Image (cartoon, grey):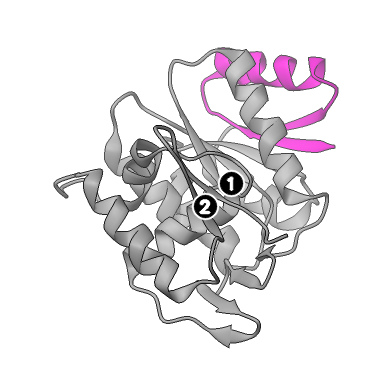
Amino acid sequence: MRILVVEDEPTLAAQLVEGVNTAGYVADVAGNGVDAHFMGNTEPYDAVILDVGLPQMDGITVLKKWRAAGRTMPVLILTARDSWHEKVAGIDAGADDYLTKPFHMEELLARLRALIRRAGGHASTELVCGPLTLDTRSSRASVDGRALTLTSHEYRVLAYLMHHQGEIVSRGDLTEHIYAQDFDRDSNTVEVFIGRLRKKLPADLIETVRGLGYRLTRPQ
């Protein structure tokens, strides 16, 4: 597995490369956004660790350009502490996960392994759970080939659940990923979006795990 590490701070970049190599992967490194953009467009990476604050071209712009070009490798973005706008912008731009600096290497590697597992060893942009299909490039969902009409928030909730299908996702996690920076975040509204989605999806596709959150499960 080849991993692209994009980080302009030399010490941290070296630590990331060492951690990735120690975990059994092969790491390439880019120290600015222009090089990262080129490498991500021309090399078949299995995943990318992408810092948001980069010289020459910022990480969000790099990610948007990759997604616009059809590059679908999993991307883990690194953001500044408590920088909500970077997290929201990154998810909206097509990031699969994020981690806040400073972080523990063990957590980064755990998240990286999860991204590679979910990718399933291929670059398909379609996520499938039983009769439900979500096309992450077109931001469209369908059930048995029938297109679903979703609001932007409904889509973001569904997309997050699809990316984490089989896992328990808390209301707090969902709230963190569906609202813009200046929005008044209220985790109770997640229940509203879940209720709306359940009316549009096959029965029992979204399971409530009492006291913990929700889980998207493949029908038996």
Locate residue 98, reporting x and y percent.
48, 36
Q: Nearer the viewer, residue 197 or 157?
A: 197
Disc 1 crowd rating (10 Å Cα; few below 14, some 14-19, many 20+) is some
Does residue 112 belong to the magenta stretch? Answer: no
Query: Real-space Cα distance between discs 2 and 1?
Result: 5 Å
Q: Nearer the viewer, residue 215 or 181?
A: 215
Give, as a three-letter code, the residue at label 2: Leu
Locate residue 204, reporting x and y percent.
55, 61
- Residue 17 falls left or right of residue 65: right
Helix, strand, or loop for circle 1? Answer: loop
Locate residue 62, reporting x and y percent.
52, 52
What residue is shown at x 28% (from left), y 27% (from top)? 82
Image quarter hosting the N terminus: top right
Disc 2 crowd rating (10 Å Cα; few below 14, some 14-19, many 20+) is many
Q: Which mark is residue 42?
A: none
Magenta segment range?
1-28
* Residue, disc 2: 161
- Residue 60 falls left or right of residue 216: left
Q: Which quadrant holds residue 36?
A: top right
Q: Is residue 63 visible?
A: no
Does residue 24 belong to the magenta stretch? Answer: yes
Give, as a three-letter code, the residue at label 1: His
Q: Is residue 21 visible?
A: yes
Count of numbered circles on the image: 2
Q: Which mark is residue 164?
A: 1
Q: Nearer the viewer, residue 46 or 62?
A: 46
**Circles 2, 1 touching at the beta carbon (< 8 Å):** yes
